[in-house]
Image (cartoon, rainbow, N blue to C red):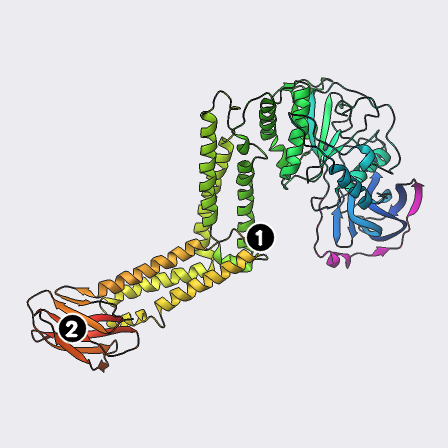
Amino acid sequence: MKILKTTATTLLLLLVYSTQAQRLIKTTENVHTYALEVKPQTAYALKFTKAFQSISVAYGTGQSLKGAEVRVGEEQFFLEKNSHVRSESQQFSQLLVLAKSENGFQFESGQLSGKIQIHLYNLGNTQAVQRQVQAYKARFRTQQNCGKPASIPQSVWRTGLTPEPIPDPVVTDVKHLIIHHSVSSNSATDQVAILRGIYLYHRATLGWNDIAYNYLIAPDGTLYEGRDPQGKETEGDNIRGGHFCTGRQDGTMGVCLLGTFVDFEPSVPMLKTLIDILTWKVKKDGMDPFGTAPHPLGMPIVNNLPVIAGHQDGCTTLCPGAKVYEKIADIRDKISADVQVCAGKTDHCAALRITGDVYTAVYQLERDFETSLANCKSGNGTGNCTALCSGKSFLDQITTLRSQITAIEQACQNDTQNCVQPCNSQNLLNLLTQLEQQVNSEIQFWLNSTSEVSQEVTLLESEVNQTLANCNTNLEACRAFYPANTFEASITALKAKVDSLQAICQADANASTVNADILRSKLSRLEIKIDQKITELSQQNQLVVYPNPVSNGLLQIRSLAIAQITAIRLKNILGKGFSIRQVVRTSNPFVWQVLLPSLPSGWYLLEMQIDGKWERRRLLLK
Ligand SMILES: [Zn+2]
């Protein structure tokens, strides 16, 4: 299910609204079914007398949902086929769960043509149920020693929904623990509504015995009991569900993560609860979390189904989504470690395993960098940061994480007798190395080519280099060193610009990792370069004028050779002369003291007549 919160109104203008009316054909307390005859590429503004918070569509075999959409307020849903349902007579869309109760929606038929059915679900007062869930959670106890994590019973979350589950559920000998996702919205805030919607969709619309899964987990980590054992067993883990491939439900226990994890990361609390419920089952039944076993029905595609598997390991589906599926190896690793900890071992590597602090920080860093980079590239919402793209904070964090990983590995190696082996750190180190390469190449790209502030810094750098080179032969070029209006002022201004842009970026939570340290250090290097050149300018052979820069107007001229200074004069850089207030020859015959007049700061020329020849020294007054 995809939700676009964009302007869909322009598209509507191209469509003709039909006045075709829907007809109520079946109604129960919670599910109302309407029939509607549709034409292709037609928009329908549908109004209903009964409020609903959830929608699904049934349509004929041979028909396609391509282009079919539901719009409610600003929410736009693209209808997709539910490929898990096998029916001879009709096909079903996925379940849509809305943010709140509604009385109507806009339906765009796309390629659909002919009779369809619309199922509207009254989920009841989900806010009241949510409050009951919270009250129940307040009594939760943390489970120790691989016990079953606390869960919300069916009697709490399913309250008031009809029809009830079909009586007499089947008990099965579980060999496989199957992970799913619900393909519901990741931005939804009312998970109880989603849970109740899924129940009604499975039970009433698809006609299944009960909700398909044994357990469901919300993004906040709350565990919900799924298929109702109805007294057949106490914990619900061996009740045969309806979550795996059609006709192959035996021997499986299904856990469903509420959300869509195709390109969205499951939350840490959700993963932790998933690991806890699977760990409990693995330990209780003595299962091997790394093992495989033939599926009890011996179907060819599941001959060697892992003990802990994703739905897609056995059936043709993308479930549980790539972002969960790619973590299953880490989930097995963590379950194995947890079972060993429950048997008395110490997991020094806990922070490196999935849901551990360091593991989470590594993946979070990767996501932060992607977000930061996307912000930099698009300027979207953080346009001011575009000019400042820099990865220094990322490089620093990579270094810190690397050293943390090394220290944790060392702690495990120092306690080989007790430590759960091995530390699962190679993936994390590889990820950090990849990230480091990416950060470095992106920094180069942005600093060299794209960032406007960076371009200003680069331009200034080349101007300084050129001027410094010219200054040795052309005094006029040295005017650029006047502090008031040229390079020093440019550097100061650019630093201020960088600082203020960074302040704006840091005020934006999305761009908090963008920083400008690299640009700032480049400007500092430029400053040093100018300072060094200024010092060089005052150090020529045979004659030293110091201090230079001159701060209080008093300077000394020391002749290193045996030479007589017979006259001294001071000019500005353009050659205009100033009178020198006092020249004193000291007791050292080679040292003169000169008191300069009070002048604006900047570069000047000090001219001295030595053995009848005039020589110039550039002098900086501060
Ligand atoms: Zn699934």
Disc 2: which residue: 593
Please tell me whether residue 608 is drawn above or below residue 119 in the rendered image: below
Q: Amino acid at mark 2?
A: Gln
x and y, in percent, of residue 338 in the image: 60, 26
Q: Is residue 21 within the magenta segment?
A: yes
- Residue picked out by circle 1: 510
Ligand 1 position by quadrant? top right
Count of numbered circles on the image: 2
Q: Indicate the quadrant where residue 549 lies.
A: bottom left
In depth, the one of 159 and 248 nearer the eye is 159
Mark 1 CB within 8 Å of ligand 1 = no
Crowd rating for badge 2 (residues with CA inside 10 Å; few <14, some 14–19, many 20+): some
Q: Quadrant of the N terminus?
A: top right
Q: Nearer the viewer, mark 2 or mark 1?
A: 2
Q: Quadrant of the C terminus?
A: bottom left
From this viewpoint, is residue 94 visible? no
Question: Looking at the picture, which amino acid does disc 1 mark?
Answer: Asn
Closer to the chain start, of discs 2 and 1, is 1
Write down the region rendered in magenta: 1-28
Determine whether, in the image, residue 524 is placed left or right of residue 99.
left
Name above or below for residue 94 compared with residue 47: above
Mark 2 vs 1: CB contact within 8 A: no
Is residue 308 visible in this depiction of the protein? yes
> Is residue 544 shown above or below 287?
below
**Front residue of this view, candidates 207 and 588:** 588
Q: Magenta stretch: residue 136 in it?
A: no
Give how far apart the Cα atoms at labels 2 and 1 are: 61 Å
Q: Quadrant of residue 555?
A: bottom left
Per the image, label 2 sits on a secondary structure element best described as strand
